[in-house]
Each structure stands twice: as C-alpha cells, then as structure tokens.
Amino acid sequence: MAPAGGVATFQFGTGIKGKGLDKQKRRQLNQPRGICLCADGSLLVADYGNHCVLKFKPGDAKGQVVAGEEGKFLPTVDPLKDIDKPMCLPEEEGVLLKRPGDVCEDLERGMLVLDTDEGSVQRFGGDTRAKTLVPVGGKSIHKSVGAPEIVKNPRGLTVAPDGALIVCDTWSHRVLRFAPPGSAEEMEKATVLAGMPNTWGRQGGPPPVPR
C-alpha cells in the first residue's frame, strides 16, 4: 500500500497473479517471496508460485528465468505410491524447483536458492545442474518431517560474512547455521542459533514450561 497521498509504481511484476509476459511485455509474478539486490544492480526474485527464480536488470521489466522453469515444479517421489519405480531422486533434480522461498548471491558470485517445499539450499551457476548444499550430504527420498536434522518449510536465507549459510527453519521454530560450503566443517551438523533444537512434533513449538 502506498503512503497516504502517494502513488505506488510497479517496478517489477504487474500486480496481478500470473506467469510469462503480459501484453505490455512485463513479467507477471505469482506470490514472489524472497528478493536479493545483486552487486551489479540486478534484482533476483524467488517467484514462489511459479517455481523459479527471475533476474531483472535495471530498467528491464521482462526479466529472465535463471533457476528452475517457470510454471513447472520438481515432481515428488513417494516411496509408497511409486513402489514399482526406481527409488531415486527425480530426473529433474538440480534443474527444477518446488516453491522457492528466498534467493541470494554468495561470496563466489554464484546464486543460492532456498527451496521451501524441498527444504533445501542449492547453488546455481556454472554447472548444468545445481549443487545441493543443504541438506548436508545431499537430498534423499527417505526423509521424515519428524527427523530432527531435517529442515522443514524454510522461509529465509542469508550468507554470513564467513560464507556460512543461515537458514530460517520455519516449521522447526529455529534458525540454523550451516558451515561454509567447501570448508573443513562442511559436513558437520548445523548449529542452532535461535530457538530450540528439534522443536517439531508439538504444534505449539517448544515443550510447555513446568509449573
């Protein structure tokens, strides 16, 4: 909402949910969540509802898809429903996204994407497929929302000055720090910076305080 007496200008997007370009050649968005202003002045936008990340250069209303594929999401492998199929990650792993919630540049000028539904952080840029940084050691089809080490429905991502990944693990009611990718501590478990470890399992969050 614009301040009283002011006028709101749509710098990117149209104000109407959609995908692709409208008649004025402006990029339409669908529930954009995270944004990042790059060093070159470009803007990265995590287009949550369109399962992709867009990059807008200054003065460019069209934008360009730089991660994922607009309107197409990463399929889910269900070990129970897909029992007759090979138990492995989908072929589109590292290419498609599923509701990205945040995005940022990393210290190597790459691009880090927080995939909310997948509970992962991936680095795009350079290679044909993205590299999974979170979960540590890569993704697995065998995961449970009750497992304490699983990141559940994360909503925020930032990179610390030392290169560590700071993730807002929303459904676990905590903020996690993952060691800088490529460091000697890379494979270690995440550190809880805020909240309580493994608070998932109680709808109200942390255990009740004894009276």
Image (spheres, rainbow, N blue to C red):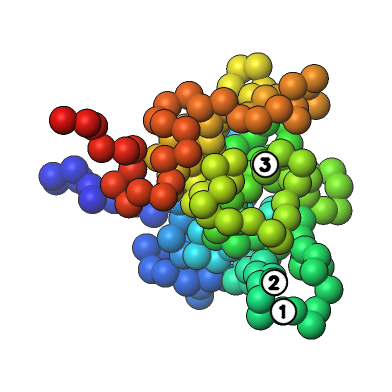
Mark 3 burial class by Cα count in 10 Å: few <14, some 14-19, many 20+: many
Q: How many discs appear? A: 3
Residue at the limit of the structure toward the right, as seen here: 127
Determine the image quadrant of residue 131: top right
- Image disc number at residue 82: 1
Q: Quadrant of the C terminus?
A: top left
Disc 2 marks which residue? 79
Q: Is residue 67 left or right of residue 42?
A: right
* Mark 1 element type: loop
Between 189 and 49, the one nearer to me in the picture: 189
Q: Position of residue 88 (x, y in %)?
A: 80, 65
Does residue 124 lie above or below 29 as drawn? above
Determine the image quadrant of residue 112: top right
Q: Position of residue 113 (x, y in %)?
A: 63, 46
Q: CA distance from mark 2 to mark 3?
A: 21 Å
The amino acid pointed to by label 1 is Asp
- Residues at badges 1 and 2 in contact (C-beta under 8 Å)? yes
The amino acid pointed to by label 3 is Val
